[in-house]
Image (cartoon, grey):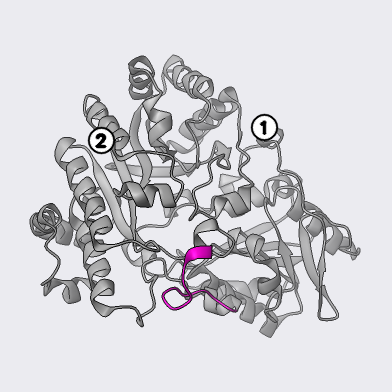
Amino acid sequence: MKRIVLIQPHEGVYNKVLKPWIPLSLLSTVVKLDAEGWPISIIDQRVNADWSQDLVALLSQQPVCVGITSMTGSQILGGLKAARIVKQYSKVPVVWGGVHSSIFPTLTLKDDLVDIVVRGEGEVTFYELVKRLQEGHSLDGLQGVWFKRDGQIVENPERDFINMDDFPDVPYHLVNLNDYLHQFFGQRRVLEVESSRGCPYACAFCYNPLYGKRKWRALGAENVIGRIQTLVDRNKVRCFHFIDDGFFIDKDRVRQIMEGIVHRGLEIKLGFQGARIDTLRKMSDEDMNSLCRAGGTFLQFGVESGSPRILQLINKQIEVGEVIELNRRLARFPSLIPYYNFMCGFPTETREDLFMTTSLAWQLLAENRQAMISPFHHYKPYPGTPLAKIATDENYITGKSLEEWGHFDWTEGIKHERDKSSLRLLKNVEMVSIFADRKMESQSDSRLWAFLGSLYRPIARLRLRHNIYSFMPEGRLLRH
């Protein structure tokens, strides 16, 4: 068996502030290959300063292929750097996977540095691809794979989604866990885990309906509990962050998981990335107490806007009053930290709409001492999403090549041709939202950022509470 090399690209500014999460997408992709004993090397640019030298050394072994994963944005640039090295030192095929190439396979394959694209989940597709490459067989008909032949793109059929219970747990042993155990939601040594995939909802700004086809799939409750037990026993991990987009969709499954954790006596802490306002509102107090007993600590909600008009525009299917009501209810469970995601700069959004959102954010912080808010991320149109269709070309940027998409900065969504005062307002709101609560202290492993956050927080809270963003001399310094 030849070696398989996988690349986790750098993430730009985030790696300067936050310790990286474990590369779950890569580990999941090779779960079948690892089970069969294939030699696998994962190069993570985020934690390996000598990654390029290590890649060159591995290329001398003539691996089957080099796989690169990437979300849309700065990860693409890191992936392209790795692909250039592969092309310079070998004839090994470069395989691109992840969300971006799955949604934009044609544009990805047009780049000279990309030979093959794996669309969607990789557990079966990448496994079969490696087998064919190893044996020198044609890629024709291989579901989920697009490739180039004589400069022409060959499109194979899509592959159905997997049944998550059919596969063993991801091979955590392929990486050094200590590189990824990080501080989050006030806990140390937190590790990301996945128990479900997909989201049945259809938010108009989100890529997920394009990628996941609104199909939600999940591990069975016993499987989830067993995998957590293994990480506790083998790796002494006791804080878990579920990166599911919809962990709470199946209430019976949630109840079984929480009761199973309590029954096994696992003294752990749990955080959840994918929580919806409408879903949690349906949980009884008994279910909330069960969640707390099992170690539930952190709940991340997508609110996005405090403007009823904008909420309707983006098809969020929640109301502002429901957000306020749930936040007040969660205040009765002091062990739970609700974290509310917000965005700004939506198409047609007015200054009044924006200030409705900032006012809602302040109200949530004021009425629940445990609550936190996300930075106010700038909206950017993702082609193919309903909201992108009404975003005007003069105000929004979209990439025309793979490298251009690498400059798709989630915090710089609007062209500078737009009214400069509006752009400045959005940037100032974003900066204030970063420091208005305890995010830096509870999420960043950097003592410097935690210290700066604590110093600036009183000023940030004053600005958020009274919507004072017109004169911010500290903005340039903090951005620098």
Principal secondary structure, stretch drawn in magenta: loop
Residue 391 included in the magenta stretch of the image? yes
Q: Give residue 338's mark.
A: none
Q: Is residue 472 magenta-colored?
A: no
For disc 2, the marked residue is 324
Q: Give the tally of numbered discs.
A: 2
Q: Is residue 196 above or below residue 287?
A: below
Q: Residue 226, percent across and down?
A: 56, 27
Amino acid type of the residue that numbered disc 2 sits on in the rendered structure = Ile
Is 309 situated left or right of 359 in this image? right
Circle 2 — which element?
Answer: helix
Residue 250 or residue 43, whichever sits in front: 250
Horizontal arrangement in the rendering, residue 181 relative to residue 421 (left or right)? right
Residue at point 58% right, 79% down?
400
Residue at 59% across / 27% down in the picture?
223
Q: Label 1 sits on what residue type?
A: Asp
Between marks 2 and 1 in the image, the one whose residue lies nearer the viewer: 2
Q: Which residues are magenta?
A: 389-400
Name the secondary structure under disc 1.
helix
C-alpha gap between disc 2 and disc 1: 37 Å
Q: Position of residue 215 (x, y in %)?
A: 63, 40
Report whether 119 appears left or right of 180: right
Closer to the camera in the image, 341 or 228: 341
Q: Point out which mark residue 165 bears.
A: 1
**407 over 170 or under it: above or below:** below
The answer to whether any part of residue 455 appears in the image is yes
Instruction: State yes or no: discs 2 and 1 in contact (Cβ < 8 Å).
Output: no
- Identify which residue is drawn at 58% across, 41% down: 197
Quarter containing the C terminus: bottom left
Name the spot of residue 228 as percent of width and height, x first: 50, 31
* Of the pair 467 and 176, the residue shown nearer to us: 467
Whichever of callouts 2 and 1 sits on the residue coming sooner in the sequence is: 1
